[in-house]
Amino acid sequence: MKSQLAQVLTALAAGLVFGFGLSLSGMLDPARVQGFLDIFGAWDPSLAFVLGGAVAVATAGMQILRSMDRPAFDRTFHLPSSNAIDRRLIVGSAIFGAGWGFGGFCPGPAVASLSLGLIQSVIFAAFMLAGMMLHDRYVARRTS
Amino acid sequence: MNTYMSPLAGGMLIGLSAAMLLLLNGRIAGISGIVGRLAQGIGIATNTAFVIGLMLGPVVFLGLFGEWPTITITASLPLIAGAGLLVGFGSRMGSGCTSGHGVLGLARLSPRSMAAVATFLATGVAAVAILKGFGG
């Protein structure tokens, strides 16, 4: 029970750091995200630094993980086990990328931006949730 | 902060968040996974806590800097709705988005995530090229 509380507090803190990081980075701004993807037009490469900084720190985290038998507040690490580069991965990622380009939001910024109360982000997040549930309830093969 | 320092600092915080969740809870900070599992009623306490924290991020930004983060949206509401549907469906079908595949997948040197990132960057670029082509 003690570790359950620690897990919830960790998740809250991690979410907060993530949401603040997104806000600071410029990823919350769909126009800027679209500028990053506009490599054939007025390309704004600055958001590449978001991915670069995030991967660098996460890589350090992965190095620390290798010296640990288990996470601090759980019995085992819950890491993805699949290595398959299959049709679902590619088709799903292609669909996701198209939506990301058209709307300028990916899931993190879509959720974080809800605080600002803009009608556009509320609509985006509502339809994103609908898309997730549509997939998980009616399309996903029940293998797991 | 300037054009490149803010994205770098923000990105490093995102990486820190991912490392925290990984080393303390043993979980991948993939937003589509967290939101998708929450919608399925899995891990309600921790996933709800993460989502609340995520939404508090911009509020802390407001407290520190005295203004909300910039958000500029030019797309029409129907396009936004369609884009949201694609993002939700696609990220669940592909088992991840910019955070799970992008940040953690690349940090783990996962070939699967590298393929996903290359794919969603390519179609994202194509989608913006199509938008600009129509005068968006």
Image (spheres, coloured by chain):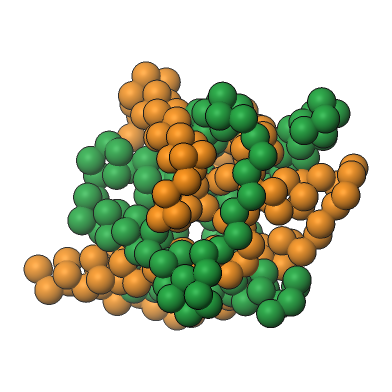
Total numbered circles = 0
Query: From the viewer's perspective, is residue A136 above or below residue B9?
Result: above
Q: Residue at x 88, y 49 (%)?
A: A42
Q: Which chain is orange?
A: A
As rendered, which of A93 and B59 lies closer to the eye?
B59
Residue A43: horizontal and vertical position, in percent?
Answer: 85, 52
Residue A49: horizontal and vertical position, in percent?
Answer: 72, 67
Q: Residue at x 40, y 24 (%)?
A: A134
Horizontal side of B120 relative to B53 (left or right) equals: right
Which quarter of the rendering shows the N terminus of chain B? Answer: bottom right
Q: Residue at x 52, y 64 (%)?
A: B68
Residue closest to the far top: A138
Horizontal side of B134 relative to B9 (left or right) equals: right
Query: From the viewer's perspective, is residue B41 above or below residue A33?
Result: above
Residue A101: horizontal and vertical position, in percent?
Answer: 68, 38
Which image quadrant for residue B115? top right
Is residue B31 in sight in this rendering?
no
Q: Chain B: give its colour.
A: green
Residue B45: horizontal and vertical position, in percent?
Answer: 20, 56
Q: Residue at x 46, y 34 (%)?
A: A123
Residue closest to the far left: A1
